[in-house]
Amino acid sequence: MKKIIILAVALVASAISTTGFAQGTKMVGGAEMYPSKDIVDNAVNSKDHTTLVAAVKAAGLVETLKSDGPFTVFAPTNDAFNKLPEGTVGTLVKPENKAMLTKILTYHVVSGKFSAGDVVNAIKAGKGTAVFTTVSGGKLSAMMNGKNVVLKDENGGTATVTIADVNQKNGVIHVIDSVVLPK
């Protein structure tokens, strides 16, 4: 009987930590992302998004991403930023490069809330490719690679969605493995 109870508790704990089912949360960067919080308030808790959060602060976009939205954010991880040439992030966060940093960051944001299902449906409707206009005014293409959604930027660079549908009170975050860049 004791083994059955322990197994049941372990299964429930596993379901909560992997699906967030009990509280409607998902785990990102070792932290629960709460649908009742905004994009910024959740992102600051993800150990995988410290570079993104620092860049958002340097660009002065905190208040924008705390506003009502809704927004769809394709959020690059620290590892994604580390793929950029050495010194790129340090250069971008300098005050004199704020306009360029803002353009890059807002290229990762689409107005409206697009779940993974919405993106996949748009890809199907577009016969294999969906094109989204970003907040920066650029175009970001989405396509499927097997079961994965892949984004293609205006320069031909790609990023894969690694965690989808991280719901926020002002939109949704999809975690990506590379930084996408506008022209």
Image (cartoon, grey):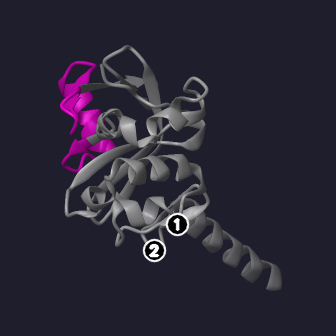
Badge 1 density bin: few <14, some 14–19, many ≥20, Cα 10 Å: some
Sequence order check: which comes first, mark 1 or mark 2? 2
Task: Measuring from the top left, give residue 31's x and y in whole percent.
Answer: 57, 64
| Residues at marks 1 and 2, CA–CA distance in whole angstroms | 9 Å
Q: Are discs 1 and 2 less than 8 Å apart at CB?
A: yes
Callout 1 amino acid: Glu
Res 147 seen here: no
User: Which residue sits at x=34%, y=72%?
Assistant: 36
In the picture of the structure, the residue carrying the numbered disc 1 is: 32
The image quarter containing residue 131 is: top left
Q: Which mark is residue 23?
A: 2
Callout 2 amino acid: Gln
Relative side of 127 to 74, left or right: left
Does the magenta portion include 124? yes
User: Which residue sits at x=36%, y=59%?
Assistant: 39
Res 4 seen here: yes
Q: Nearer the viewer, mark 1 or mark 2?
A: 1
